[in-house]
Amino acid sequence: MKVDLLIHSASQLLTCAAPEGPLSGANQGAIGLIEDGAIAIDAGRITHVGPTTDVRPTVDARVEMDASGYAVLPGFVDAHTHAVFAGHRADEFEQRVAGATYQDIMAAGGGIMSTVRATRQAKLRELVMQSHKRLNAMLTHGTTTAEVKSGYGLTLETELKMLAAISALNTDHPVELIPTFLGAHAIPDEYRDRADDFIDEVVDEMLPRVAVADALLPPFADIEASGYQPVAVFVDVFCDVGAFNLEQSRRVLERAQELGLEIKIHTDEFESLGGAALAAELGAVSADHLAVTPREEIERMAEAGVVGVLLPGTTFGLGSDHYADARTMVEVGLPVALGTDLNPGPCWCVSMPFMITLATRYMKMTLAEAVVAATINAAYASGVGDEVGSLETGKAGDLVVLEWSDYRHLAYRFGENPVATVIKEGTIHEVLDGVA
Ligand code: NIG
Ligand code: FE
């Protein structure tokens, strides 16, 4: 068979195959390692995967890549990002280093609201330009698909502007983005002490507009003129102290479901308000953070088929030692996924390999469990488990060629980029000199 690309002789090829759904429990670490592996891609899709001796004789490739001495694995899927924003908060980082807590800063009007002010001011074009650079850095570190949230606008117009920016980036940049509407990310200054009124606005005004692809109407002429549609696949809410309570979170998520959108929840980052149980009750696709989730709620999520998205970079960036209890999650059969939580607050980090390092050292995940969490389970957490996240025939030709022959270097070496080459839908993006 004639194919566009053949990569052969990889010292290790990790398939992370999981056609039935996310991997959990004893299978959380099922990386599907093939020694001396090969993969063929045609028209952006994987046509063959297996030992080089099986694949190579059956294909006639236009381009061949000899990957001997390199490990190959699925492109990373970053299951949770806030990659679209304007400005930075280096001043707050310095305050946190000096002892201020995330909540102190938020209560003083900083934190998320500080980025909201910068993002409200930014023109759509500026927002796209600033975020484009971050997507380049993500791609360079091996991320080929990422979930991205709105939530730094908090008015109808500025939330639509964020979603339009995500849609522009999706058109212009190789990293595929899954858009999430996070209108209930923080209580805006203008609604201080009136959080219920803000939730009314989210539920009555914003959600119906983001649920329908062609709902955009004047007066938002600049968004309309951009030609990019503000749409969302998921709806998320920040259910925690200092943000929204359980009842407010329920209102947002139930309305989203009525409108036909899938749901996620930010919960148990600081205190448990019952958000994980709510995720189980409503059948959320994922529940994210889960740093302080009680075992009983972890069990309920496992039964309900929720994916737990863990964000160890945020715990690290907060200088906290309270990492999510990944071992209990694996033990009770909750599929674990990883995300960077890339945001201008506690975790400005684009690197999934660094998340794998943190997961192994601070959450006691095995290397193989963390790789599954960063690929196929993150794909299922983002609603694209049938399309990306593993090296299986028919799926998108998204993969990473590591600089090293052994995938364990991913976690073992940190602070340098382990990625030599990234391939997105069969298109080669060289990162380091080496594999050609
Ligand atoms: O997931 N916790 C809420 N939202 C983000 C932080 C966003 C920010 O501080 O700008 C998070 O950690
Ligand atoms: Fe987040």
Image (cartoon, rainbow, N blue to C red):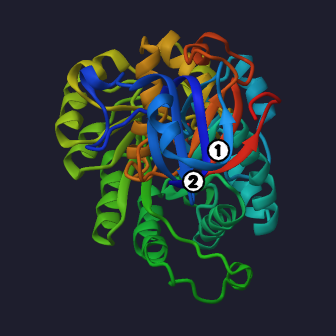
How many C-alpha atoms fall within 10 Å of the one at disc 1: few (<14), some, or many (≥20)? many
Quadrant holding the C terminus: top right
Count every numbered label the image shows and give the total.
2
Position of residue 112 measured from the top left corner of the image (x, y, whole percent) = 63, 45
Q: Which tag is nearer the camera, tag 1 or tag 2?
A: 2
Label 2 lies in ligand 2 vicinity (Cβ under 8 Å): no
Q: Residue at x 49, y 49 (%)?
A: 46
Q: Nearer the viewer, residue 189 or 319?
A: 319
Q: Nearer the viewer, residue 368 or 73?
A: 73
- The part of the image, by quadrant, that contains residue 24 is top left
Residue 295 visible in the picture: yes
User: Tag on residue 423?
Assistant: 1
Residue tagged 2: 3
Asked if residue 20 is positioned above or below residue 340 in the image, the reply reads below
Per the image, label 2 sits on a secondary structure element best described as strand
Q: Residue furthest front?
A: 57
Q: Earlier in the sequence, mark 1 or mark 2?
A: 2
Q: Residue at x 23, y 42 (%)?
A: 305
Disc 1 to disc 2: CB gap under 8 Å: no
Task: Judge left or right: residue 84 versus residue 367.
Answer: right
Position of residue 247 measured from the top left corner of the image (x, y, whole percent) = 30, 51
Q: Amino acid at mark 1?
A: Ile
Position of residue 355 measured from the top left corner of the image (x, y, whole percent) = 57, 25
Q: Ligand 1, what quadrant?
A: top right
Q: Residue at x 51, y 30 (%)?
A: 52
Task: Judge left or right: residue 287 versus residue 129.
Answer: left
Q: Amino acid at mark 2?
A: Val
Residue 109 visible in the picture: no
Task: State the separation of the CA atoms marked 1 and 2.
Answer: 15 Å
